[in-house]
Amino acid sequence: MRKLRGINTFRILCVLGIALYGILFLSLVFSPDSVVKDMGEGSGSLIYFLARRTSTLMLGFAVLLFLVRHAECSKTRAAVSVAVAVNMAGFACTGIFEYAIGRVGTPIFFSVSVELVYAFMFGAQALADYRKLRKSV
């Protein structure tokens, strides 16, 4: 994506991503029940363990986006965008699969929708960066 009227779309995506990953981190660490209930699963020690382990992944992505939010167009910035897009698309695909086999309920589609939007936006950012880099060579 390009700068529109002086707006750095990559920075905006990063700030939104930091917010999403931060909320997920806090939810999974301090309130795994709320996350699990929304998806139609029961609670238990294994669920809590996996939720807290997953929370560190969310924190890692939030920190990564925080550190690169001011990055200029580069292969590294494009690679970060691809990583976030793949991460979000993976979450969405997992949610759809788990719904298809009956393991989670319809509330998963709110999460899947948000994840698909993020995957698309970061994917589009990566493509725009790669195109710009290719033209500059």
Image (cartoon, rainbow, N blue to C red):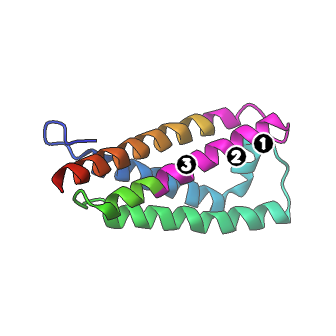
Q: In this figure, which residue is indicated by the disc labeled 3? A: 88
Q: Main secondary structure of the magenta part?
A: helix
User: Residue 19 location in percent, x, y?
Assistant: 44, 52
Q: Quadrant of residue 74?
A: bottom left
Q: Nearer the viewer, residue 30 or 83?
A: 83
What is the span of residues highlighted in magenta in the rendered image? 83-110
Residue 10: x and y in percent read 30, 49
x, y (%) of residue 57?
58, 65
Distance between mark 2 and mark 1 Cα atoms:
6 Å
Q: Do the residues bearing badges 2 and 1 touch, measured as CB atoms within 8 Å?
A: yes
Q: Which mark is residue 83?
A: none
Mark pair 1, 3: CA separation:
15 Å
Q: Nearer the viewer, residue 125 or 27?
A: 125
* Amino acid beneath label 1: Glu
* Amino acid type of the residue that numbered disc 2 sits on in the rendered structure: Thr
Numbered-mark total: 3
Read off the residue under disc 1.
98
User: Which residue appears at 70% of the width and 57% of the height?
Assistant: 32
Q: Residue at x 83, y 54 (%)?
A: 43
- Tag 3 secondary structure: helix
Residue 85 is inside the magenta segment: yes
Image position of 73 (left or right of 24)? left
Instruction: Sort mark 3 into few (<14), some (14-19) or many (20+) by Cα contacts within 10 Å.
Output: many
How crowded is the residue under tag 1: few (<14 C-alpha within 10 Å), some, or many (20+)?
some
- Given the image, on which type of amino acid does mark 3 rest? Met
- Dividing the image into 4 quarters, which one contains the C terminus? bottom left
Camera-nearest residue between 33 and 83: 83
The relative height of residue 97 versus residue 87 in the rendered view (above or below) is above
Q: Do labels 1 and 3 touch, CB within 8 Å? A: no
Report which residue position mark 2 lands on.
94
Looking at this rendering, what residue extends furthest in the left direction?
6
